[in-house]
Image (spheres, rainbow, N blue to C red):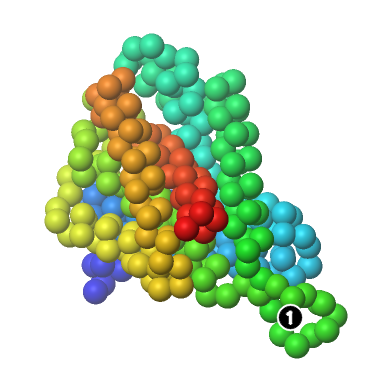
Amino acid sequence: MKKELHIFFTALMFYTRIPCPKNIDHHPDYLNKASRYFPVIGWLVGSISFVFFYFAALVFSNEIAVILSIIAGILVTGAFHEDGFADVCDGFGGGWTKEKILLIMKDSAIGAYGAIGLVLLFLLKFQGLVQLTNKAQIPDFGFGIWNMSRSFGIETLLFFITAHSLSRLAAISIVFTHQYSREDATSKSKPIAQSYTWREVFGAFFFGLLPLLILSFFYWQILFAVIPVFLFRFFLARYFQKWIGGYTGDCLGATQQVCEVVFYLSSFALWKFI
């Protein structure tokens, strides 16, 4: 149990800005094993985002509450995945060879492709969350001052958690099926990509799919959201393989962001047409 806690805190330290015990470091062995808890980080980020959304929605409009929830998620992760998405947009948008793409992605400066990509990403994420949360409601807890008839229940919380856990599962699954692209150790994600066992695979899929399965008790249609999410994961992994012969940490971050948005849009489409 002590070792598993150490592995979990390693994942927490690597993927978020949440304070961890002082004895936790980026030990390669623990980083390899930490991939099993990557979707669990989604549980935390999704829960925190929901809390900000919930209480903001008591005071502000649904749109403002969604924006604050997105900001909360970014602050918790330190824009870790958004940065990877921007780097992928710049690298694959401006590079035509493996070497050039990897060089551009390594540059900390953001270019036009990255800036445009982030704007479009956040627009889709914002609109997707607004459309979905408009279907939910906020309880007034008996306080007439709120004068609200809407209510956000456990289903909405599960929706936030599922979006983050399932998208992280889609991202980390690339580690299990493809090779790391860089030949050096310049990327901070290099240690996590060196090896894995069945425990990492089982843990990632268990923690990644569990919130979705629970949510399906409320909305059975949500199970079909797995299809478009993993279709996008498949095509992204294939695209990365074609151009750079594998993946990098930025590719995983980009996959997480894209699959999160795909989940929002797919969920809305499922609830609207099924």
Q: Is residue 34 left or right of residue 42?
A: left
Spot occupied by residue 80 in the image (x, y as percentages of width and height): 48, 43
With respect to residue 87, does 31 lie above or below? below
Label 1: state its secondary structure.
loop
With respect to residue 25, does 82 lie above or below? above
Circle 1 is placed at which residue position? Answer: 140
Q: Is residue 214 left or right of residue 257?
A: left
Q: Residues within 10 Å of mark 1 (few under 14, many from 20)?
A: some
Quarter of the picture containing the N terminus is: bottom left
Query: Which residue is rendered at x = 42% and y = 61% of the image?
Result: 221
With respect to residue 55, does 34 lie above or below? above
- The number of numbered badges drawn on the structure is 1
Spot occupied by residue 11 in the image (x, y as percentages of width and height): 36, 56
Say which quarter of the image contains residue 135.
bottom right
Spot occupied by residue 108 in the image (x, y as percentages of width and height): 51, 27
Answer whether residue 186 is visible to the viewer in this image.
Answer: yes
Say which quarter of the image contains residue 272.
bottom right
Q: Amino acid at mark 1?
A: Asp
